[in-house]
Amino acid sequence: MNTDIDRLAIVVGDILLEKRLMLATVESCTGGWIAQTVTNIPGSSAWFERGFVTYSNEAKQELVGVQAETLTKHGAVSREVAVEMALGGVQRSRADVAVSVTGIAGPDGGTPEKPVGTVWIAWADRHGRSEAICYGLQGDRRAVREASVEHALCGLTDFLNTHE
């Protein structure tokens, strides 16, 4: 258990509760780790609406509406797909805001253009606003996934604090 991540989840929950917003998560390489982290917080049902684990391209399309053309043109690990995942998470839930993660956790699957550790994280709200950041994370599979969760929650606090 990572106490920094746990603290971030508490901060996220406090902000969501204060703003009376509900959260959805849309996760690929983190496999539900963000949802697990936030639901470890007692009372999270007041601000966590649901989580989607969209590991395959088909799941990304079926569960949150990522377009096949976007996947073909940009690949699953891209800004465009991360944003569509986050927007779809809001559109296909009762949440007000969503965070999405798509990346290459390794040890295989990397390319020269998208090496292992390439992770796109996006945040979106019900008004259609979105932001996305690409991270080049280091370490083994677990380290990349754990850092992805931490960056997702940290970025969510920034997104919530800069958007009303």
Image: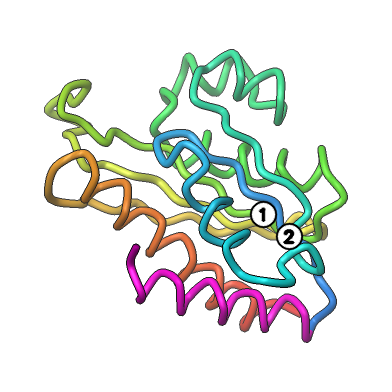
The verdict on residue 93 being magenta is: no
Q: Which residue is mark 2?
A: 48
Task: Estimate the spatial distance between the alpha carbons at disc 2 and disc 1, rounded to whole Å.
Answer: 10 Å
4 left or right of 123?
Answer: left
Q: Is residue 32 above or below residue 130?
A: above
**Residue at x 53% of width, y 71% of height:** 9
Location of residue 164 (image quadrant) = bottom right
Q: What's under tag 1, amino acid-wise? A: Ala
Q: Position of residue 44 (x, y in %)?
A: 71, 67
Kind of element beneath mark 2: strand
Mark 2 and mark 1 lie on one chain; the one further toward the N terminus is 2
> Residue 63 got which mark?
none
- Closest to the camera, between mark 2 and mark 1, is 2
Pointer 1: residues within 10 angstroms few (<14), some, or many (20+)? many
Q: Is residue 26 above or below residue 122?
A: above
Q: Is residue 158 above or below residue 98?
A: below
> Residue 98 got which mark?
1
* Residue bounds of the magenta highlight: 1-18
- Seen from the viewer's position, the closer of residues 101 and 87 is 101
Pointer 2: residues within 10 angstroms few (<14), some, or many (20+)? many
Kind of element beneath mark 1: strand
Q: Is residue 43 above or below residue 116?
A: below
Location of residue 99 (image quadrant) = bottom right
